[in-house]
Amino acid sequence: MRHLIDPMDLSVEEIDQLLDLADDIIANPKEYENACAHKKLATLFFEPSTRTRLSFEAAMMELGGNVLGFSSADSSSATKGESVADTVKVVSCYADIIAMRHPKEGAPCLAAMKSDAPIINAGDGGHNHPTQTLTDLLTIRREKGRLDNLTIGCCGDLKFGRTVHSLIKAMSRYSNVHFIMISPEELEIPDYLKEEVFEKGGMSYEQVRTIDEVIDRLDVLYMTRVQRERFFNEADYVRLKDTYILNMKKLKNAKDDLSILHPLPRVNEISVEVDDDPRACYFRQALNGKYVRMALILKMLESAKGE
Protein backbone atom coordinates (compact mmCIF):
# COMPACT_ATOMS: atom_id res chain seq x y z
CA MET A 1 0.00 0.00 0.00
CA ARG A 2 1.37 3.41 -1.00
CA HIS A 3 0.87 6.78 0.66
CA LEU A 4 1.64 10.18 -0.87
CA ILE A 5 3.07 12.55 1.72
CA ASP A 6 5.77 14.42 -0.20
CA PRO A 7 5.98 15.03 -3.98
CA MET A 8 9.43 13.43 -3.88
CA ASP A 9 7.77 10.14 -2.83
CA LEU A 10 7.08 9.67 -6.54
CA SER A 11 9.76 8.82 -9.06
CA VAL A 12 9.96 10.75 -12.33
CA GLU A 13 8.58 7.66 -14.09
CA GLU A 14 5.62 7.51 -11.70
CA ILE A 15 4.91 11.21 -12.18
CA ASP A 16 5.00 10.81 -15.95
CA GLN A 17 2.59 7.85 -15.69
CA LEU A 18 0.20 9.90 -13.53
CA LEU A 19 0.28 12.82 -15.96
CA ASP A 20 -0.28 10.45 -18.91
CA LEU A 21 -3.27 8.94 -17.11
CA ALA A 22 -4.66 12.42 -16.35
CA ASP A 23 -4.33 13.32 -20.04
CA ASP A 24 -6.22 10.14 -20.98
CA ILE A 25 -8.98 10.94 -18.47
CA ILE A 26 -9.34 14.40 -20.04
CA ALA A 27 -9.52 12.87 -23.53
CA ASN A 28 -11.79 9.92 -22.65
CA PRO A 29 -13.86 10.79 -19.55
CA LYS A 30 -16.61 8.23 -20.19
CA GLU A 31 -14.11 5.38 -19.93
CA TYR A 32 -13.48 6.26 -16.29
CA GLU A 33 -16.94 7.18 -15.04
CA ASN A 34 -17.37 3.87 -13.15
CA ALA A 35 -13.71 3.17 -12.37
CA CYS A 36 -14.25 3.68 -8.61
CA ALA A 37 -17.78 2.33 -8.30
CA HIS A 38 -18.46 1.17 -4.72
CA LYS A 39 -15.27 2.86 -3.48
CA LYS A 40 -15.24 5.58 -0.83
CA LEU A 41 -12.93 8.57 -0.41
CA ALA A 42 -12.73 10.21 3.03
CA THR A 43 -11.77 13.90 3.03
CA LEU A 44 -10.34 14.75 6.46
CA PHE A 45 -9.80 18.49 6.37
CA PHE A 46 -8.69 19.80 9.76
CA GLU A 47 -8.47 23.31 8.29
CA PRO A 48 -10.64 25.07 5.69
CA SER A 49 -10.13 24.57 1.97
CA THR A 50 -12.07 25.33 -1.19
CA ARG A 51 -10.24 24.11 -4.30
CA THR A 52 -8.37 21.17 -2.82
CA ARG A 53 -11.28 19.60 -0.93
CA LEU A 54 -13.86 20.17 -3.66
CA SER A 55 -11.54 18.95 -6.41
CA PHE A 56 -10.89 15.73 -4.48
CA GLU A 57 -14.62 15.24 -4.01
CA ALA A 58 -15.40 16.04 -7.65
CA ALA A 59 -12.61 13.67 -8.74
CA MET A 60 -14.02 10.75 -6.79
CA MET A 61 -17.59 11.45 -7.92
CA GLU A 62 -16.54 11.58 -11.59
CA LEU A 63 -14.90 8.19 -11.09
CA GLY A 64 -18.23 6.82 -9.87
CA GLY A 65 -17.19 6.65 -6.22
CA ASN A 66 -18.60 8.14 -3.02
CA VAL A 67 -17.27 10.71 -0.57
CA LEU A 68 -17.50 11.10 3.20
CA GLY A 69 -15.61 13.23 5.68
CA PHE A 70 -15.49 16.66 7.27
CA SER A 71 -14.41 20.13 6.17
CA SER A 72 -13.00 21.54 9.43
CA ALA A 73 -11.70 20.29 12.76
CA ASP A 74 -14.73 21.90 14.45
CA SER A 75 -16.99 19.28 12.90
CA SER A 76 -14.87 16.30 13.96
CA SER A 77 -14.07 14.51 17.20
CA ALA A 78 -10.85 16.54 17.35
CA THR A 79 -12.94 19.02 19.37
CA LYS A 80 -13.29 16.26 22.00
CA GLY A 81 -9.54 15.73 22.09
CA GLU A 82 -9.30 12.72 19.79
CA SER A 83 -5.82 12.29 18.33
CA VAL A 84 -5.10 12.39 14.60
CA ALA A 85 -3.85 8.80 14.83
CA ASP A 86 -7.13 7.57 16.32
CA THR A 87 -9.26 9.57 13.88
CA VAL A 88 -7.43 8.11 10.90
CA LYS A 89 -7.42 4.57 12.28
CA VAL A 90 -11.21 4.70 12.66
CA VAL A 91 -11.92 6.43 9.33
CA SER A 92 -9.76 3.89 7.50
CA CYS A 93 -12.30 1.29 8.64
CA TYR A 94 -14.96 3.12 6.61
CA ALA A 95 -13.10 4.40 3.54
CA ASP A 96 -10.91 2.92 0.82
CA ILE A 97 -8.67 6.00 0.50
CA ILE A 98 -8.15 9.18 2.56
CA ALA A 99 -7.24 12.74 1.57
CA MET A 100 -6.07 14.69 4.60
CA ARG A 101 -5.21 18.34 5.25
CA HIS A 102 -3.84 19.44 8.60
CA PRO A 103 -2.31 22.70 9.92
CA LYS A 104 0.54 20.82 11.66
CA GLU A 105 3.52 19.80 9.58
CA GLY A 106 4.04 16.04 9.63
CA ALA A 107 0.47 15.13 10.62
CA PRO A 108 -0.23 13.17 7.38
CA CYS A 109 3.03 11.25 7.90
CA LEU A 110 1.81 10.20 11.36
CA ALA A 111 -1.57 9.32 9.85
CA ALA A 112 0.08 7.06 7.27
CA MET A 113 1.68 5.02 10.08
CA LYS A 114 -1.74 4.25 11.58
CA SER A 115 -4.03 4.04 8.56
CA ASP A 116 -5.34 0.87 6.95
CA ALA A 117 -6.12 2.87 3.79
CA PRO A 118 -3.84 4.92 1.50
CA ILE A 119 -3.26 8.49 2.71
CA ILE A 120 -2.91 11.44 0.35
CA ASN A 121 -1.44 14.55 1.92
CA ALA A 122 -3.71 17.44 0.89
CA GLY A 123 -1.45 19.98 2.60
CA ASP A 124 0.29 20.03 5.99
CA GLY A 125 1.10 23.47 7.32
CA GLY A 126 3.88 25.16 5.34
CA HIS A 127 5.46 21.81 4.54
CA ASN A 128 4.11 19.90 1.54
CA HIS A 129 1.21 20.01 -0.89
CA PRO A 130 1.99 17.18 -3.34
CA THR A 131 -1.28 17.21 -5.27
CA GLN A 132 -0.85 20.93 -5.98
CA THR A 133 2.61 20.09 -7.30
CA LEU A 134 1.15 17.40 -9.57
CA THR A 135 -1.46 19.93 -10.71
CA ASP A 136 1.30 22.40 -11.56
CA LEU A 137 3.31 19.78 -13.45
CA LEU A 138 0.28 18.68 -15.48
CA THR A 139 -0.55 22.29 -16.31
CA ILE A 140 3.00 23.13 -17.39
CA ARG A 141 3.20 19.99 -19.52
CA ARG A 142 -0.17 20.59 -21.16
CA GLU A 143 0.60 24.26 -21.82
CA LYS A 144 4.25 23.92 -22.89
CA GLY A 145 4.35 20.32 -24.13
CA ARG A 146 7.34 19.50 -21.90
CA LEU A 147 8.81 19.64 -18.39
CA ASP A 148 12.41 20.24 -19.44
CA ASN A 149 14.22 23.10 -21.21
CA LEU A 150 12.22 25.80 -19.41
CA THR A 151 12.87 29.13 -17.74
CA ILE A 152 10.46 29.47 -14.82
CA GLY A 153 9.91 32.66 -12.85
CA CYS A 154 8.49 32.35 -9.32
CA CYS A 155 7.15 35.64 -7.97
CA GLY A 156 5.92 36.86 -4.60
CA ASP A 157 6.24 35.13 -1.25
CA LEU A 158 9.01 32.63 -1.90
CA LYS A 159 10.00 32.26 1.75
CA PHE A 160 6.78 30.79 3.14
CA GLY A 161 5.04 29.52 -0.03
CA ARG A 162 4.87 25.72 0.15
CA THR A 163 3.62 25.45 -3.43
CA VAL A 164 6.77 27.14 -4.77
CA HIS A 165 9.04 25.00 -2.59
CA SER A 166 7.39 21.78 -3.78
CA LEU A 167 7.46 22.85 -7.43
CA ILE A 168 11.18 23.63 -7.26
CA LYS A 169 11.95 20.23 -5.73
CA ALA A 170 9.85 18.42 -8.32
CA MET A 171 11.33 20.31 -11.28
CA SER A 172 14.87 19.69 -10.04
CA ARG A 173 14.67 16.21 -11.58
CA TYR A 174 14.08 17.49 -15.11
CA SER A 175 16.90 18.69 -17.36
CA ASN A 176 17.83 22.24 -18.33
CA VAL A 177 15.33 24.01 -16.05
CA HIS A 178 16.37 27.50 -14.96
CA PHE A 179 14.55 29.25 -12.10
CA ILE A 180 14.35 33.02 -11.67
CA MET A 181 13.25 33.93 -8.15
CA ILE A 182 11.40 37.28 -8.07
CA SER A 183 10.80 38.64 -4.57
CA PRO A 184 11.60 41.35 -2.05
CA GLU A 185 14.61 40.61 0.15
CA GLU A 186 12.29 39.89 3.08
CA LEU A 187 10.59 37.04 1.19
CA GLU A 188 13.51 35.38 -0.60
CA ILE A 189 13.57 31.63 -1.02
CA PRO A 190 14.90 29.89 2.14
CA ASP A 191 18.62 29.14 2.36
CA TYR A 192 18.02 25.39 2.75
CA LEU A 193 16.41 25.25 -0.71
CA LYS A 194 19.24 27.25 -2.23
CA GLU A 195 21.77 24.87 -0.72
CA GLU A 196 19.99 21.50 -1.00
CA VAL A 197 18.17 21.86 -4.31
CA PHE A 198 19.91 24.52 -6.37
CA GLU A 199 23.55 24.32 -5.30
CA LYS A 200 23.92 20.63 -4.36
CA GLY A 201 21.69 19.57 -7.22
CA GLY A 202 23.51 21.75 -9.73
CA MET A 203 20.28 23.48 -10.76
CA SER A 204 20.68 26.99 -12.18
CA TYR A 205 18.85 29.92 -10.61
CA GLU A 206 19.06 33.64 -10.06
CA GLN A 207 17.39 36.14 -7.76
CA VAL A 208 15.92 39.46 -8.92
CA ARG A 209 13.70 42.12 -7.38
CA THR A 210 11.20 42.97 -10.15
CA ILE A 211 9.11 41.18 -12.76
CA ASP A 212 9.93 43.82 -15.39
CA GLU A 213 13.63 42.97 -15.61
CA VAL A 214 13.04 39.30 -16.55
CA ILE A 215 9.53 39.00 -18.03
CA ASP A 216 10.84 38.74 -21.61
CA ARG A 217 12.88 35.62 -20.74
CA LEU A 218 10.19 33.54 -19.04
CA ASP A 219 8.42 30.45 -20.38
CA VAL A 220 6.37 30.10 -17.19
CA LEU A 221 5.49 32.69 -14.54
CA TYR A 222 4.30 31.23 -11.22
CA MET A 223 2.63 33.96 -9.17
CA THR A 224 2.01 33.97 -5.43
CA ARG A 225 0.70 36.58 -3.01
CA VAL A 226 2.99 39.04 -1.22
CA GLN A 227 1.49 38.88 2.23
CA ARG A 228 1.23 41.98 4.39
CA GLU A 229 1.60 39.93 7.57
CA ARG A 230 5.10 38.77 6.57
CA PHE A 231 6.58 42.28 6.84
CA PHE A 232 8.05 43.78 9.97
CA ASN A 233 6.53 47.18 9.24
CA GLU A 234 3.71 48.57 7.15
CA ALA A 235 5.95 51.06 5.34
CA ASP A 236 8.01 48.28 3.71
CA TYR A 237 4.85 46.50 2.56
CA VAL A 238 3.35 49.66 1.07
CA ARG A 239 6.65 50.43 -0.69
CA LEU A 240 6.90 47.00 -2.31
CA LYS A 241 3.40 45.62 -2.82
CA ASP A 242 2.66 47.12 -6.26
CA THR A 243 5.98 45.81 -7.61
CA TYR A 244 4.52 42.31 -7.51
CA ILE A 245 1.11 42.91 -9.04
CA LEU A 246 0.92 41.45 -12.53
CA ASN A 247 -1.01 43.57 -15.02
CA MET A 248 -1.15 43.98 -18.78
CA LYS A 249 1.49 46.71 -18.70
CA LYS A 250 3.98 44.30 -17.12
CA LEU A 251 3.12 41.68 -19.76
CA LYS A 252 3.93 44.05 -22.65
CA ASN A 253 7.38 42.50 -23.22
CA ALA A 254 6.43 38.90 -22.32
CA LYS A 255 6.60 36.01 -24.78
CA ASP A 256 3.43 35.29 -26.75
CA ASP A 257 3.42 31.75 -25.36
CA LEU A 258 4.16 32.62 -21.73
CA SER A 259 2.14 30.49 -19.28
CA ILE A 260 0.94 32.30 -16.15
CA LEU A 261 0.19 30.01 -13.20
CA HIS A 262 -1.13 30.69 -9.69
CA PRO A 263 -2.12 28.09 -7.06
CA LEU A 264 -5.01 30.36 -5.93
CA PRO A 265 -6.69 31.92 -4.05
CA ARG A 266 -5.79 35.19 -5.70
CA VAL A 267 -6.17 38.46 -3.79
CA ASN A 268 -4.79 41.31 -5.92
CA GLU A 269 -1.43 40.00 -7.17
CA ILE A 270 -2.84 39.37 -10.65
CA SER A 271 -5.03 42.11 -12.06
CA VAL A 272 -8.41 40.87 -13.31
CA GLU A 273 -7.58 42.41 -16.70
CA VAL A 274 -5.10 39.55 -17.19
CA ASP A 275 -7.84 36.91 -16.90
CA ASP A 276 -8.90 37.24 -20.54
CA ASP A 277 -5.35 36.97 -21.87
CA PRO A 278 -4.76 33.51 -23.42
CA ARG A 279 -1.52 33.27 -21.45
CA ALA A 280 -3.48 33.18 -18.17
CA CYS A 281 -3.57 29.51 -17.18
CA TYR A 282 -4.63 29.63 -13.52
CA PHE A 283 -8.28 28.67 -14.00
CA ARG A 284 -7.28 25.87 -16.40
CA GLN A 285 -4.75 24.92 -13.71
CA ALA A 286 -7.56 24.61 -11.13
CA LEU A 287 -9.47 22.32 -13.50
CA ASN A 288 -6.35 20.24 -14.10
CA GLY A 289 -6.24 19.67 -10.34
CA LYS A 290 -9.39 17.59 -10.58
CA TYR A 291 -8.02 15.40 -13.35
CA VAL A 292 -4.65 14.77 -11.72
CA ARG A 293 -6.41 13.83 -8.47
CA MET A 294 -8.59 11.40 -10.43
CA ALA A 295 -5.44 9.79 -11.80
CA LEU A 296 -3.83 9.68 -8.36
CA ILE A 297 -6.87 8.08 -6.73
CA LEU A 298 -6.93 5.38 -9.41
CA LYS A 299 -3.21 4.63 -9.07
CA MET A 300 -3.28 4.51 -5.27
CA LEU A 301 -6.31 2.25 -5.15
CA GLU A 302 -4.52 -0.10 -7.56
CA SER A 303 -1.52 -0.04 -5.23
CA ALA A 304 -3.71 -0.86 -2.23
CA LYS A 305 -5.00 -3.94 -4.07
CA GLY A 306 -1.46 -4.94 -5.03
CA GLU A 307 -2.13 -4.60 -8.76
Image (cartoon, rainbow, N blue to C red):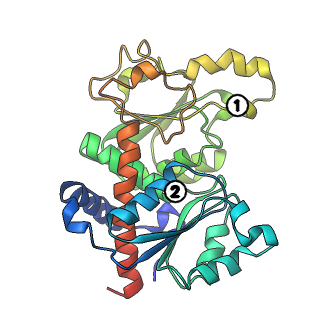
The reply to whether residue 291 is in sight is yes
Category of crowding for the residue at label 1, using alpha-carbon neighbours closer than 10 angstroms: few (below 14), some (14–19), many (at least 20):
some
Vertical placement of residue 176 versus 244, above or below: below
The residue at 36%/87% (across/down) is: 306
- Does residue 183 appear to the left or right of 220 in the view shown? right
Asked whether 74 or 89 is in front, the reply is 74
The reply to whether residue 12 is in sight is no
Asked whether 6 or 102 is in front, the reply is 102
Q: Earlier in the sequence, mark 1 or mark 2?
A: 2
Category of crowding for the residue at label 2, using alpha-carbon neighbours closer than 10 angstroms: few (below 14), some (14–19), many (at least 20):
many
The residue at 20%/63% (across/down) is: 30
Secondary structure at numbered mark 2: helix
Q: Which mark is residue 186?
A: 1
The residue at 38%/55% (across/down) is: 290
Question: Mark 1 near mark 2, Cβ–Cβ under 8 Å?
Answer: no
The residue at 53%/47% (across/down) is: 163
Place of residue 285 in the rendered image (x, y in percent of width and height, measured from the top left): 38, 43
Asked whether 15 or 195 is in front, the reply is 15
- Does residue 99 appear to the left or right of 20 in the view shown? right
Residue assigned mark 2: 53
Mark 1–mark 2 distance (CA, rounded to whole Å): 31 Å
- Does residue 152 appear to the left or right of 117 in the view shown? left
Place of residue 94 in the rendered image (x, y in percent of width and height, measured from the top left): 54, 82
Tell me the quadrant of the picture where the C terminus can be found.
bottom left
Picture quarter containing residue 23? bottom left
Residue type, label 1: Glu
